[in-house]
Amino acid sequence: LDELQRFLDRRAPGRDATATSRNEADKVRIVSGIVDGYTCGAPIAAVIVNDDTRSVDYEELGRIPRPGHADYTAFIKYRGHHDVAGGGHFSGRLTAPLCIAGGIAKQVLARHGVRIAAHISALGPRPVVDEPLDAMHIVPKQIDSIRSNSLPCIDPDAASAMRDTISHAKLSLDSVGGTVECVAYGMPAGIGDPMFDGIENRIARIAFGIPAVKGVEFGDGFASARRYGSEHNDPYHLVDGTAQPMSNNAGGILGGITTGLPIVWNMSIKPTPSIGRKQASVDLVEGHETVLSIRGRHDPCIVPRAVPVAEAVCALALLDALLEDAAPVMPPLEA
């Protein structure tokens, strides 16, 4: 439970100048399913209580939608009866329970030799780019750097430059987005399914449940469209008598099934739509154009807090696949 809380702390707001000033502890309280640190067979249920609420900041958003947010589509879908306080069920706060489930899944996977790491790979309109995670083998030094730098980056200079980019956007009453790279090391080959239940599908459908995610790619992703097959293909060789790709442009997945190399994927995150600048909008109740000035305590950039969420997404998808496919691959744990 201490390890789970440390994982949730990485997502929690109010801990850094680059995030919202809301002071939400994200303190997890287990309601059922775990007794003295062990699962007991009942469903695991947990609660996070938010004590730092200011619903008045959202009152007018039920009628005047924020550009870039789901206020307008929610108004149309639910005919004005949706709950706008805190963004309702379109809020990034919903990634907190996602991290509870994913944080537990990460611990299970780690005990079976699967380790997941993520970092900010790029940030801002003139992108500050971080060093990529090794796509072939886990490099402990990279993981240590992500945890020790001021932002979750491998290169400390990139972390510093990203912080400057976020600070500039904040002072300008604006926001910035970015990209998170996530890699899962230690996944055995042969896990997943073709067509609609492939590893890409499993990860992507959870990742797109994060409100701010606008794109997901695997391996070389869109860059593969600009290469020759001879450049993009991953040739095979024998390692201890077993066939293994010599490179990992495929991101550890072929035909929806794992190759035995690390699973490499990226998710792009849009700029936070709630910004301090005045924006054109419409009063949906009175039916006239207006100008919206958003109040509240919003993140100038949610990308740093999305890093553990990417890990949670990956852990949930991969653990599901392993439980379905790989009983022989996952030996019973010793007591």
Image: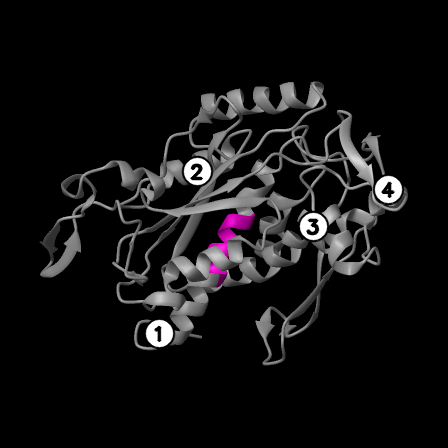
Along the line of sight, the residue nearer the viewer: 174 or 265:
174
Which residue is denoted by mark 2 in the rendering?
144
Secondary structure state at the residue bearing disc 1: helix
Quadrant of the image containing the N terminus: bottom right
Secondary structure state at the residue bearing disc 2: helix
- Judge whether 253 appears above or below 31 on screen: above
Tell me the amino acid under the disc marked 3. Answer: Arg
Q: Are marks 2 and 3 in contact (CB under 8 Å)?
A: no
Labels 4, 1: front one: 4
- Disc 2 and disc 3: Cα gap in Å? 27 Å
Q: Earlier in the sequence, mark 4 or mark 1?
A: 4
Q: Are marks 2 and 4 in contact (CB under 8 Å)?
A: no
- Asked if one can make out residue 296 in the rendered structure from this viewpoint, the answer is yes
Residue range (magenta): 309-316
Q: Is residue 204 magenta?
A: no
Labels 3, 4: front one: 4
- Disc 2 and disc 4: Cα gap in Å? 54 Å
- The location of residue 260, given as percent across then percent down, is 26, 58
- Disc 1 and disc 3: Cα gap in Å? 32 Å
Please give the name of the residue rendered at 46% of the width and 62% of the height, measured from the top-left corner.
317
Please give the name of the residue rendered at 45% of the width and 57% of the height, measured from the top-left corner.
203
Tell me the amino acid under the disc marked 4. Answer: Gly
Which residue is denoted by mark 1 in the rendering?
325
Q: Earlier in the sequence, mark 2 or mark 3?
A: 3
Image quadrant in which you'd find residue 188: bottom left
Question: How many other residues sit within 10 Å of disc 1, few (<14), some (14-19) or many (≥20)?
Answer: some
In terms of secondary structure, what is the magenta stretch mainly? Answer: helix
Which residue is denoted by mark 4 in the rendering?
287
Which residue is denoted by mark 3 in the rendering?
93
Please give the name of the residue rendered at 35% of the width and 66% of the height, measured from the top-left corner.
195
- Disc 3 and disc 4: Cα gap in Å? 31 Å
Q: Earlier in the sequence, mark 2 or mark 4?
A: 2
